Image (cartoon, rainbow, N blue to C red):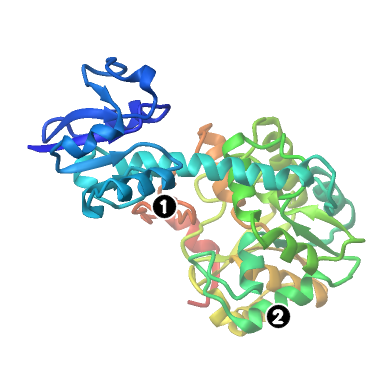
Amino acid sequence: MLCVYVWGAGYYAQQVIDEIDKENVNILGIFDQDEQKCGTDLFYPIPIILPIEISRKKFDYLIISVKKYQSILNECKRLNIPSEKIIIYWERNEKNNIFVERSKRVEELMCENRKYQYRLDSAPYEWGIKFTPKILNGQKLLKKIILDNSSLCRFGDGEFEIIRQRERPWFQKPNSILGNRLKEILVSKTDRINIAIAQNFGNFEQYKEEAADIIREYMFGDTRRYILELIDKNRIYYDTYVTRPYIIYKNKKNADEIFLLFKKIWEKKSVVIVEGEYSRIGIGNDLMEGTSNIFRILCPYKNAWDKYEDILGIVLKKVSKNSLVCISLGPTATVLAYDLAQRGYQALDIGQLDNEYEWYLRDVRERISIPGKLVAEVSEKQSFVMVDERKYLNQVIAKVV
C-alpha cells in the first residue's frame, strides 16, 4: 500500500482526500503552515502537522491540494523533497492511479471555471454595452415570407466556420469555393432574399441556460469579432434559429407559433424538398401536411457541396418556378437557396426544422435520435430503417448521390 501525505488543510483538502483511493493508499497526515490547525482531526482522524516535520517522515508521495501551489513547490525544493514524489492535484494526468475519478473531477471544475469566463466575456454584449447586430425574430421573418413569398438563406456556426476554412459540421468538409460563396451571400442585398444569422449576440434570456452557455463558449475568443467584421453592421438581419425553435428555448410557445407559421407558408403549395438522403423531412409527422403535393430530390447526406453543380442542374431541370423549394443540405442549402432565388424561384433553407418538430411532438428536453432519420447532433448509432416507405419513395423525383 502506498503511503502519502497531503499538503494543505484548507478549502480544497476535503475534495482531494475524498478522491484518494483508500483501498490502495494510506493517508498518513496533512501538512499545513497554520499552527492553529495542527493536531486537529479536521476531516478524518488524520493528524495535521507543520511542514517543518516533513524531513522526519517517510512516504511514497506528497499530494499538494492547494490551487496556487508554486510557493509550496518552492518550499518542497528547499526541504529537498524529490520532485518525483510530489503530486499536484490540479495538474491533469499526473499519477491518476492514486485517485478515484480524479481526472473527471478536475475536468468538471475546469469546465465550471471556463463557463464563468465565457459568461464574463459575453456580458457586455448581452447587456447592450457593446455593439450587437440588429436581428429580427423568427415570427417577423415568417410573417414577411407569407406576405411577399421571399426566400431564405441562413448562416449558423457551420456556415461561419466554413467561411473561416475550419472544420465544424461533420457533414461538410471545408471548401474555399463554398466559403467564398457564403461570404458573398452574407453581404448581398436582394429584396426577395432574407439573410438570417444566429442570434448569438444580445440578450439570451429566451434560451435555456445550458444552450446560452454553449453559445457563449462558441463566441468566445476571436469568433465574435470575426463575425462582426464579416457582416454589414447597418443591415437588419433575421434570426437563423427560426428553424430551431424548440430545443434551446425555455418557452415552448415559441415553437407553437413558429411551426404554425411554417405550415402557413407551404399551405396549398406544391413543395419540392431538396434534402440529404436520410433526412426524410415530413415523413412520420404532419409537418408538411396542407401542401397540395410534395416531391423530393435526394442528395448526399455528407459533403453535398461536392455535387453542387449536379444538384443545382437537376433542380433547374425538374422543378417548376411555381413550386416552393425547401432545402436541408447544411451550408450547401444556403448557396442553393440563393442561386435559385436569383433565378426566380422561392427557396427556403429550412435546416434541421424537421428534427426540431419531432422533438417538439415528443416533448423531449434534449436532442434524441429519431427512428428512420439522420439527426446531425446525435453521435450515437442511428437507425435508418424506413418509415412510410411507399409514401416516401413515390415522392422522389430525382437522386444526386
Residue located beneath label 1 in the image: 372
Mark 2 and 1 residues: CB-CB less than 8 Å, in contact?
Answer: no
Amino acid type for the residue under numbered disc 1? Gly
Q: Residue at x 63, y 41 (%)?
A: 212
Q: Read off the residue under disc 2.
A: 180
Q: Earlier in the sequence, mark 2 or mark 1?
A: 2
Whether residue 156 is visible, yes or no, is yes
Residue occupying the far left of the picture: 1
- The spot of residue 332 in percent (x, y) is 62, 72
Q: Please state the horizontal and vertical placement of residue 377, each as a whole percent of the image.
A: 49, 53
Q: In which quarter of the image is residue 320?
A: bottom right
x, y percent for residue 130: 84, 49
Q: How crowded is mark 2: few (under 14 residues within 10 Å), some or many (20 or more)?
A: some
Horizontal arrangement in the rendering, residue 398 relative to residue 192 (left or right):
left
Residue lying at 40% horizontally and 48% vertically, measured from the top left: 371
Query: At 78% from the left edge and 62% from the top edge, which residue is drawn?
Result: 228
In the rendered image of this protein, does residue 339 appear above or below residue 135? below
Circle 2 SS class: helix
Which residue is drawn at the image coordinates 72% and 39% (left, top)?
Answer: 204
Q: Position of residue 194 (x, y in %)?
A: 82, 61
The three-letter amino acid code for the residue at tag 2 is: Asn
Residue 229 occupies quadrant: bottom right
Looking at the rendered structure, the secondary structure element under dot 1 is loop
